[in-house]
Amino acid sequence: MQYSPEDRPDGTATVLQPGFLASVFRDLGADVLDERESPEEPAAAHGRAAALTHHRTLTVRAEHERLADLLRRAALPVSAMDFESQLRSYEPRPYQAGELDQADDTEPRWEDYAPSEPPAADPDEAPSRRLLDSGYQRELAQARLRHQRDLREWRTRRAEAADTGALAARAAHEQAEQARARAVREYNETLEECRRAYRLAEPAAVESLLERALAAAEGATQDLPAPCRAVFRPLTRTAVLDLDLPPLDRVPSLSGYRLTPAGEIEPVSRPSADRAADYLRLAARLALRALQAADAVDTDEILAGVVLNGWLRETPSGEPLCLLSVDADRDALARTRLLPPHPAAEGPGAPEESAGHGYGSGPGDGVYADAEQDEALVRLRDLAAAVTPDPYALAAVEPSGIAGSAVPSAAELSPNEFAYVVRELLTWGGLAGWSVRLRGAGGLVATGEGEPGSALPGRWVVWASRGAEPVTEEELRTLAEAVREEGADRGLRLTSGRFSEAALDLVGSAPYQQIHLVDGDGVRELAQTHLGLPLA
């Protein structure tokens, strides 16, 4: 039976599916416009692009707000992690009794049931006669019955509890409590041993306490890992802290997005100075927080100073770069407020929306504070810190001190450490009245007075330096002039290196015999002899 192509056997018409002809022509290789698609209206396309631009800009703004929150939390005060704060206390936990153990498990005592004796009617009456009172005897008999009944019930409960394991549970609870009390006692005893070792300036104990305090200081910014390692040098009683700074991409590089007249979405980059200022603000807060943690934990004043180096680990070359370095003695830390007073009021301000759907950061807005005016960086510079001028240019600074081997060399010491060693050595020699005139990374110039009869009698001008270059005769002539200008009796030229042949010959001549020399071997021998500690 034949049917027309328009009809089906059931009499219904055949309807072609949408896109059927298009698929046929596409199989034949023809270019076909999809019937379901239509050319976009320019206004609708522009609206979608504007909405996408706004959405991306909001994402950038959220990054700026996260940075502001990090800056606020990084400036929060650090809780002291000294030994007293780490002591633990034991508080017993009550036993949670079962159904058959809810009642008082104490054995009934007769003293709780015995009635009080009747009062005496006549003061001269004998006590035995009062006890024969009939009312008292009835109360006494009833009390004995109650006591015996309660005693039987208590014994029954004990027997039932033994069958259900309640006694074993109570015994297990008591054993667990004894173990908790013992653990707290042993922990506190171990802590006291650590405190004794810390007061003796044992490196392991000092480093352990410092790293606990530094780890606790990170609690406010757990979403921003900034580990800090500590090395203690008994020679100079100085802690060298190596702080890992956050990656450079932690600070947003964009201020937003904008829509061009052609309808394209393009990013709006922040000024490089603003981005560098924000990174330095964050790095400065992390450094100050580490310094405060180390200073707060040292309640016994074991540390004479702290050296902190801030390292950028993620670099294109793979080699870490030192972006900031602080060399501060105890007095400098004590007179410097290490955290901003109002951290909640600081942080990036809310940017204003620009005409191009982005967020501007022009000089009139003041979106980010200038690095030179940031209080955290000002406090670092009060500590004579060296700070990179541009972290994004990977401009490194020289570390004040290096946390290298267990026995440091003079080159690894910070300027404060080197001055400390020189002062301690000369103090052992009898030189008092120490006054530093000049001090830098390469050494120091100071004056001192020695008592008569000491190893260094009279007034001295001391010039101490460290470095690989030999001391020249010109430097000795400069020292001789300083001795004359100060009206001193002698001059001491001390170096961690050596002297040139010309300098040694010059000291042998008559005009320079008041100049005394100590080379690197002599410094190391003096440190071992007088300070009892080696110097590499």
Image (cartoon, grey):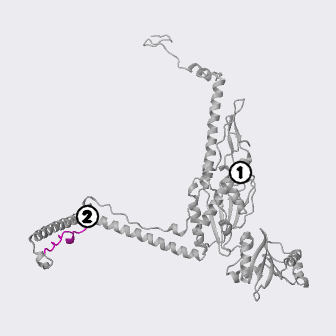
Asked if the stretch drawn in magenta spans residue 112, the answer is: yes
Q: Which residue carries the number 2 mark?
A: 104
Kindly state the secondary structure of the residue where label 1 is placed: helix
Q: Which residue carries the number 1 mark?
A: 277
Q: Is residue 207 left or right of residue 126?
A: right
Residues in magenta? 105-121
Asked if the stretch drawn in magenta spans residue 523, the answer is: no
Q: Is residue 67 left or right of residue 123?
A: right
Which amino acid type is shown beneath numbered disc 2? Asp
Residue at 88 percent across and 84 percent down: it is: 508
Residue 13, image x, y percentages:
48, 13
Quadrant of the snapshot with the N terminus: top left
Quadrant of the snapshot with the C terminus: bottom right
Quick check: 521 above or below 296?
Answer: below
Q: Quarter of the image holding residue 364?
A: top right
- Residue at far bottom of view: 453
Residue 337, image x, y percentages:
65, 61
